[in-house]
């Protein structure tokens, strides 16, 4: 099928609803770009669409239920427009495969996480052949050679560098829904990012489930990738997420410090638990002490860098004493933000087979105590920014209120007054007020 001139989507609208992580947001962008090649027009409400895609997430609670209820909301649209096609992509699609078609009869197609680039073909088959389509096989042996597809990249955009995960943390469904880990070649990433800078992009966030196990076909590791992008491309700012503590080494921190003008001093370093026994059962590959050592090493080499983390409370068998060790970790590692979750069993995972005796109320209680303590700490930590000058890449401008917004190198959303539209410029801002997630200040020259 020649895609460029295809008019399968001429005069038709496509609507994609997105759940979950940044990886999914990026995949949605890719789906829109691919469907535009079929001449579909993106629309921002489902009732104007002829094609609806739910880009699903199964990392946490009730994912299949969410798909069910969203598709249910489209029942009347489908009866008004029998040509309307509804599909599910993303992790729930990968996990459930053809079962989804059985469970949700209104669905027309299901496509897995390795089938995104087949979407034009899938939609073509669906419409031409008038039959339901399921495409959810992993293509483990295929190299990961795709260029970034983004319609209006703006100032800051995301670039996938790896896909999949081989870590098999015992609570996590991702290795089953995203498949084995593969890395894009270093030279592809250099040309991809050069193309994006030509389109006005100033900042890229490199994306992967575990970016620091990146390994290019040419042998370059993640530290080498960062160094090459900093040296050999015109990109002004580089961010990345998510890092795995076990693969975060001194070589990498050294490159980050050396290129601090370009590589941002913010690191998301998911710990998951502060207790070594729980970490062992989670199969995380480090102890509490080793994690604390790593965080110290990072802050020693990169003073002033900002850290954030992910935490799971109520992992199967987690005792009150073990939870207390997660609480006390907050006193040891200065996290400026945390993302915390109640454990929930995920299909195929090891931990899902273990007893999970803690009640939902007890899990909620632990989550509440953790978040409350962190709130106090984050307020204290934020004060260090007051009266300092931060570098802000401006991403938004509100002309009516003469207000500019961007992010500091440490990833804090920063607002300041400006009569000029400075989108795309990096400016110095003196912080007058600092809160855990946002800074307010005045521009200085
Ligand atoms: N239950 C609760 N939280 C989970 N996460 C991943 N799997 C689960 C689960 N089964 C959290 C982890 C991970 C983040 C993306 O989601 O903290 O880092
Ligand atoms: Fe899941 Fe662990 Fe892989 Fe992260 S590193 S995606 S938590 S298996």
Image: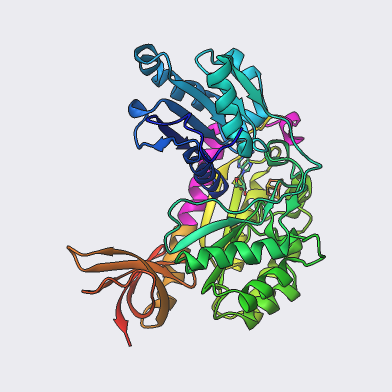
Q: How is the image coloured?
A: rainbow
Displayed quadrant of residue 79: top left
In the image, the segment drawn in magenta is: 348-373
Q: Is residue 307 visible?
A: no
Q: Is the C terminus in the top left, top right, bottom left or bottom right quadrant? A: bottom left
Where, quadrant-wise, is the N terminus in this rendering?
top right
Question: Outermost residue, left direction?
Answer: 400
Q: Residue furthest bottom?
A: 445
Q: Main secondary structure of the magenta part?
A: helix
Residue 53 position, x and y percent, is: 49, 30
Depth check: give the residue in front, 192 or 442: 192
Along the horizontal axis of the image, is 81 left or right of 241? left
Q: In this picture, is 35 found above or below 249? A: above
Q: Residue at image x 76%, y 66%?
A: 221
Residue nearest the viewer, comparing 326 with 269: 269
Magenta region includes residue 345 = no
Question: In front: 218, or 274?
Answer: 218
Side of 408 relative to 298 (left or right) = left
Instruction: Indicate the position of residue 382 as horizontal and vertical percent values.
Output: 43, 70
- Coordinates of residue 288 in the picture (x, y in percent): 72, 60
Q: Position of residue 114 (x, y in %)?
A: 68, 38
**Residue sitting at 54 percent across and 16 percent down?**
104
| Res. 97 in view | yes
The tally of labels here is 0
Q: Where 40 sits versus 183, above or below? A: above
In the rendered structure, does residue 352 fall within the stretch colored magenta?
A: yes
């Amino acid at each position: 099928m020649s895609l460029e001139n295809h008019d399968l989507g001429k005069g038709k609208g496509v609507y994609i609803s997105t759940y979950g992580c940044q990886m999914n947001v990026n995949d949605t962008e890719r789906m829109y770009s691919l469907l535009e090649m079929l001449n579909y027009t993106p629309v921002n409400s489902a009732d104007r669409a002829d094609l609806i895609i739910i880009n699903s997430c199964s990392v946490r609670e009730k994912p299949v239920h969410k798909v069910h209820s969203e598709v249910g909301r489209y029942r009347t649209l489908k009866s008004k427009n029998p040509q309307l096609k509804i599909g599910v992509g993303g992790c729930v699609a990968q996990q459930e495969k053809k079962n989804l078609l059985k469970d949700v009869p209104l669905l027309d197609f299901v496509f897995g996480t390795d089938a995104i680039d087949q979407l034009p073909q899938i939609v073509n088959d669906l419409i031409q052949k008038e039959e339901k389509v399921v495409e959810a096989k992993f293509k483990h042996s295929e190299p990961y050679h795709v260029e970034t597809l983004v319609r209006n990249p703006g100032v800051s955009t995301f670039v996938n560098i790896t896909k999949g995960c081989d870590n098999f943390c015992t609570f996590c469904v991702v290795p089953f829904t995203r498949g084995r880990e593969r890395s894009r070649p270093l030279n592809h990433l250099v040309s991809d990012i050069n193309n994006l800078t030509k389109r006005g992009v100033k900042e890229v966030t490199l994306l992967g489930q575990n970016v620091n196990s990146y390994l290019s076909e040419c042998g370059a590791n993640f530290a080498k990738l960062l160094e090459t992008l900093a040296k050999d491309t015109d990109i002004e700012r580089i961010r990345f997420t998510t890092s795995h503590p076990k693969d975060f080494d001194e070589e990498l921190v050294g490159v980050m410090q050396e290129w601090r003008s370009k590589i941002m001093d913010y690191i998301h370093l998911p710990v998951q638990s502060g207790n070594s026994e729980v970490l062992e059962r989670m199969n995380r590959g480090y102890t509490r002490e080793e994690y604390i050592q790593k965080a110290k090493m990072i802050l020693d080499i990169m003073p002033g860098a900002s850290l954030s983390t992910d935490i799971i409370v109520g992992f199967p068998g987690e005792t009150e004493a073990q939870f207390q060790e997660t609480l006390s970790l907050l006193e040891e590692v200065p996290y400026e933000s945390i993302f915390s979750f109640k454990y929930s069993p995920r299909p195929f995972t090891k931990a899902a087979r273990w007893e999970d005796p803690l009640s939902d109320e007890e899990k909620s209680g632990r989550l509440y105590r953790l978040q409350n303590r962190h709130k106090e700490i984050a307020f204290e930590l934020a004060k260090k920014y007051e009266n300092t000058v931060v570098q802000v890449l401006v991403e938004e401008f509100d002309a009516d209120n003469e207000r500019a917004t961007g992010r500091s190198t440490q990833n804090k959303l920063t607002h300041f007054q400006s009569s000029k539209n400075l989108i795309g410029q990096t400016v110095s801002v003196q912080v007058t007020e600092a809160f855990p997630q946002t800074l307010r200040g005045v521009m200085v020259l």
